[in-house]
Amino acid sequence: MTGLRRGTRLGIDVGRARVGVARSDPHGMIATPVETVPRDDASISRIVAIAAELEAFEILVGLPINLKGDDTPSTTDAREFAQALAAASGLPVRLVDERLSTVTAHTALRDSGRSQRESRSIVDQVAAMMLLQQALDVEKGTGRPPGTPVPLEPT
């Protein structure tokens, strides 16, 4: 096993209506769901508060690119959200490829016997958990932080 930075990380799945939040354990081994935050003017401040409560040292934001690796309308939204989160939190924020995380989350919830209606309130948390777990696994395997850093100032 390659080196893994210690400390709690947040995983963020940005959606138009809701934002899923997940966390890692302090050893960076396991991701678990935390909260679904409504997407509104208070979203950023709520996530910053969660990061402070959990003493997170880093925030990983899912970057929704299509299967060909191209940007989508949601990609720009996620980049802007990540930029605002970096500015407001003062924490390192990284963008990580999250292809299929929401689809996979819906499938996992359906397979567990939940209807789409029952899953709506937690699917964003599960998607955030899945993208965070994938990022943790990448770091465990490579010894390098996953994704790309978000600069504090827009480029």
Image (tube, rainbow, N blue to C red):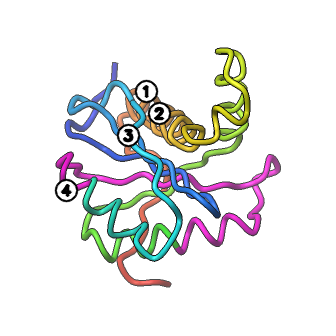
In the image shown, does 2 or 31 lie closer to the viewer? 31
Amino acid of disc 2: Val
Residue, disc 2 = 138
**Earlier sequence position, callout 2 versus callout 4:** 4
Residue, far right: 68
Q: Marks 1 and 2: in contact by CB < 8 Å?
A: yes
**Residue in view at x 54 percent, y 35 percent:** 126
Instruction: Measure the alpha-carbon separation of dots 3 and 4.
Output: 13 Å
Q: Nearer the viewer, mark 3 or mark 1?
A: 3
The segment highlighted magenta reads 51-80
Q: Nearer the viewer, mark 2 or mark 4?
A: 4
Circle 1 SS class: helix
Seen in the picture, residue 128 relative to 148 is either above or below; the reply is above
- Crowd rating for badge 4 (residues with CA inside 10 Å; few <14, some 14–19, many 20+): few
Seen in the picture, residue 24 relative to 147 is either above or below; the reply is above
Residue, disc 3 = 34
Circle 3 SS class: strand
**Earlier sequence position, callout 1 versus callout 4:** 4
Residue, disc 1 = 141
**Residue in view at x 65 percent, y 32 percent:** 118
Q: Marks 4 and 1: in contact by CB < 8 Å?
A: no
Residue 3, given in percent of the width and then of the height, sits at: 28, 30
Q: Locate residue 120: give its quadrant.
A: top right
- Crowd rating for badge 1 (residues with CA inside 10 Å; few <14, some 14–19, many 20+): few
Q: Is residue 113 left or right of residue 146?
A: right
Amino acid of disc 3: Val
Seen in the picture, residue 144 relative to 140 is either above or below; the reply is below
Instruction: Measure the alpha-carbon separation of dots 2 and 1.
Output: 5 Å
